[in-house]
Image (cartoon, grey):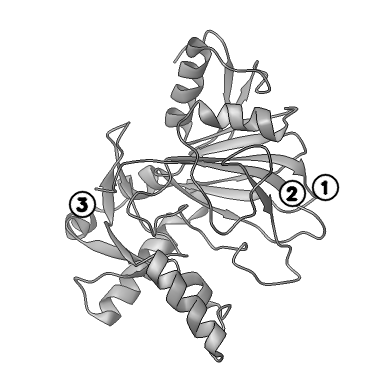
Amino acid sequence: MTYQHIEVNPYGAKLGAEISGIDLSRPMDDAVFAEVKDALYQNIAIFFHGQDMTPETFKVFCDHWGQLEDEPFIPKLEGAEGVHQFRGASNDRQTTQNLRWHVDHSYRKYPSMGAMLYAVDVPPAGGDTMFANMYAAYEDLSDSMKSFLEGLTAVHDVLAYGMDVGLFNTDTPEGFDYLKIMRENFPPMEHPLVCTHPVTGKKFLYVNQSWVKKIPQLTAIESRHLIELLNEHSTQPKYQCRYRWKNGDLIMWDNHACIHSGIPDYVGTRAMYRGSIEDHWEPS
């Protein structure tokens, strides 16, 4: 499409676009925001370079999109409600910050509409973020597989990743208490394996490595192998783009249409502002 106020250039073959001609430290008027919104839904992930943001101006950008979610697992930033301080964990230690491919909050009834990160202090090399296009992953499935997946659901569980990689210690009473509290606050949630995007109307595959635990309509063996197959299929390089960060970069992604993963291959600091946008769409 033709953009009157911004310049949009493709970043990857399957998704991603660089946006220029805009200073995000200043509020956007309705016309500019409409173009940025179109660019997001057309390209799934959008990247802005050389932005000079404070927590307050970052919040103003986030507020254009809707209500900011509270993120219980990331420290809050003082003076900018809903903005969190995201500090990645490098490859010298294992934490829940180093997630595999995932959708933000897919273990909730209403996953995030989208999320944004602003690079405050990132390493000179490494720490890239990967995205994969779940529209394309669905479209490339055979007709037989598409028919088979219709009507199937998957259970998304906030504890799945931590349990799989051994982060949660259940050997002590404190460990059991922690798991009990997590389970009470975030009970497992069931979502369809194939969803229709609430804005674009396009179908996409809804599965990821970090949170999806089982497919209840199948046996345990069938469920495990189908999840592995769909994860292997959707993370093929042909569906991906890989973003290399620089200080002052701001990125935003459509949390429904893609999966993403940060690469913990760096040493040192990786500090960012983070915001995620509340949604009232239940995957369907």
User: Residue at the location (64% across, 37% down)?
Assistant: 80
Mark nearest the camera among 2 and 1 is 2
* Secondary structure at numbered mark 1: loop
Q: Earlier in the sequence, mark 1 or mark 3?
A: 1
On residue 124, the disc is 1
Mark nearest the camera among 1 and 3 is 1
User: Residue at the location (80% across, 50% down)?
Assistant: 123
Q: Earlier in the sequence, mark 3 or mark 2?
A: 3
Judging depth in this view, the residue of 70 and 255 nearest the camera is 70
Q: Quadrant of the N terminus?
A: top left
User: Residue at the location (21% across, 74% down)?
Assistant: 218
- Residue 12 appearing in the image: no
Q: Which kind of residue does numbered mark 3 sit on?
A: Asp
* Secondary structure at numbered mark 3: helix
Q: Position of residue 113 (x, y in %)?
A: 42, 40
Vertical side of 160 occupied by 112: above or below: above
Q: CA distance from mark 1 to mark 3?
A: 44 Å
Q: Which kind of residue does numbered mark 1 sit on?
A: Pro
User: Residue at the location (51% across, 48% down)?
Assistant: 70
Q: Which kind of residue does numbered mark 2 sit on?
A: Ala
On residue 143, the disc is 3
* Secondary structure at numbered mark 2: strand
Q: Position of residue 212 (x, y in %)?
A: 38, 66
Vertical side of 118 occupied by 225: above or below: below
80 left or right, relative to 104: right
262 left or right, relative to 63: right
Judging depth in this view, the residue of 205 and 65 nearest the camera is 65
Vertical side of 33 occupied by 255: above or below: below
Q: CA distance from mark 2 to mark 1?
A: 13 Å
- Which residue is disc 2 drawn over? 271
Q: Position of residue 160 (x, y in %)?
A: 44, 72
Q: Earlier in the sequence, mark 2 or mark 1?
A: 1
